[in-house]
Amino acid sequence: MNTVPPLPAPGSAPRASAVPAPAAPGRPVPPRAPAAAAALDAPRPAAEPLRALAEVLAARPEGAARLAIARGLAAAVAALHAEGRVHGALHPGTVRIAPGGAVALGARGAARPGLGPGAPVEPAGFAAPEVLRGARAGRRADVFSTAALVQAILCGAPPFDAPTALEAAHRVLYRPPAPPGPEVPPALEDAIAAALAKPRWRRPGSVLALCAALAAPASAPAPAPAPAPNAWDGALDRARSALASLVAAAAVRRAPALGAAALRALERLRPLVAAARVRLPASRRGRAVLAVALLALAGLLAVPRGEADLAAGVAARLAAGDAAGARALLDEAERAGRRGPLLDKLRGDVACARRASGECLRRYRLALAADPALRTDPVIRENARRLLGADGCGTRRAAAELIGELRDPEALPALRAARGRGGLLAYFCTGDSIDRAIREVRADARP
C-alpha cells in the first residue's frame, strides 16, 4: 500500500495525502497504518472539494490549524521520499488541503518555473536555486521548497516574497531569506534555515529534521539563565573554534582546486629555483630562505583568478570552439566557491555556444536581475539578436523580451526584420513581444 498516492497528471484533481498531522505534540510523525490507507484511498464523495493552500491561508487560520497543515505537508513529503520519489515543484499551487485537514500533493506542472513577464510568482519563489539554474530537482530541492512552504504557512509570508517571478528568482539565488516571525520556535527556525541553504550540499538530505522540529512542543520551558561571564572569558577560545570550523569547511571545498593550482604554480617556478640556487649560498640558511620565498610565491599564484581573468578564459575557449573547456573552467570556479551574476552570465554564454537556447536565455535573465549593469554586455546582446531568428516560437518570443530589457539600439533592424517575416502567422508565434521590444528600445534611445 502506498504511503502517498501517486502524483496525478497535470490537469487532474490531486488526491489527499494519507499522512495526517500527529495527534499529540512532541511525537514524530507516524507512518500511515494500512487501515487508514485503505480508508483514504477509497473514493471520496464528489461534494468534498480540495482547497488551494493559498485560499486556506487567505482565511487566516488560527495557529493550531496552521501548525497542523505544516506538519501534514512535511509528513506527506517525507512519505513521498520514502517511496523513492521526488515531487520537484512544491509551491502553494501544487498543494491542496482536504476538508478534514489532509494534505494533497498535486500535479507537478512545468519542470522549470517561468520567469518572463506575467509568469506566476509562486513557482519561482518556492523553487530551489539549482532548479532555477536549470538542474533537475532532487530530494534536496524538495527540502528547500518544503521549508519555504512551512515558513509561509506559519508566518503568513514566504521567505522570498517578491512582486514578479524574475525578482523572486533573484531573491532565491542571491539574497538571504526573510527571518521567520516570533511564532516560530528556535529549533524550528534552525531547521528552516538549514533547509533554505542556497548550496545544495549544505541542506539536509530529507525533511525528517523539519518533521521532528514541527512535532516538538510549541512552548518548551526556557532553561535557567547561566551567570553572565566576563566579557573576555573564553573570547580567544571562541574565536579559535569559529576560525577552525571555517578553515575546515573551506579546506574540504577548495582543497582539490587549490592543491592543483599550487602544483601548477610550483612548476612555473622551476626557472626561478635554478637561478636562486646559483645566487644564494649553499647553506642551511640560504635553503630555508629559498624555500619560504618559493612557498609564498606558489601561494600567490594558486589564489583563484579574478572575475576578469575568468571571463577572459571562458571567452578564449569559446572563441576556439572549446565549449567543453569553458564549461570545465566554470565548474572549477564554482567548486572553488565562486557564485554571483557573472557566473550565471558566463554559463549563459556557454549554453548559447552549445545551442541550448532555453538555458542560455534563462541564465541571462537571472544574471540581469542580479546585476543590471550587464545590460551593456556585448556577448549577451549579440546572442539575443541571434536567437531572434531561431526556429522555435518560444525562443524568439523570449529573445525579443530580453532585447527589450537590454534596450539595445543595434537590435532595431533585427526586430523590424523579425516583425516583417511571416505576416499574420508570425503574430500567433511571438505575440506582441517584438512590438513591445521595439517600443522599449525606442523609448530608451529617445533623448
Image (cartoon, rainbow, N blue to C red):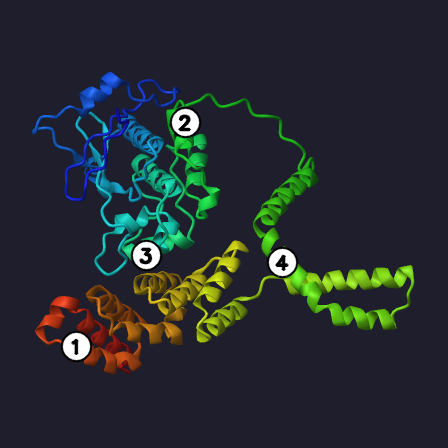
| Sequence-earlier tag: 2 or 4 | 2
Q: Rounded to the nearest whole Å, what is the CA distance between mark 3 and mark 4?
A: 38 Å
Q: Which of marks 3 and 1 is in front?
A: 1
- Is residue 34 among the parts visible in the rendering? yes
Q: Residue 285 lies in what quarter of the image?
A: bottom right
- Is residue 185 among the parts visible in the rendering? no
| Sequence-earlier tag: 3 or 4 | 3
Q: Which of marks 2 and 1 is in front?
A: 1
Residue type at the position of mark 2? Ala
Seen at 43% across and 49% down, the residue is 176
Residue type at the position of mark 4? Ala
Q: Nearer the viewer, mark 3 or mark 2?
A: 2
Q: Residue 13 lies in what quarter of the image?
A: top left
Drawn side of residue 288 relative to residue 302, left or right: right
Q: Quick one: SS at disc 4?
A: helix
Seen at 24% across and 77% down, the residue is 443
Mark 3 and 2 residues: CB-CB less than 8 Å, in contact?
no
Seen at 69% across and 38% down, the residue is 237
Q: How many numbered markers are drawn? A: 4
The residue carrying mark 1 is 419
Q: Residue 92 lies in what quarter of the image?
A: top left
Mark 3 and 4 residues: CB-CB less than 8 Å, in contact?
no
The residue carrying mark 2 is 212
Label of residue 260 in the image:
4
The residue carrying mark 3 is 167
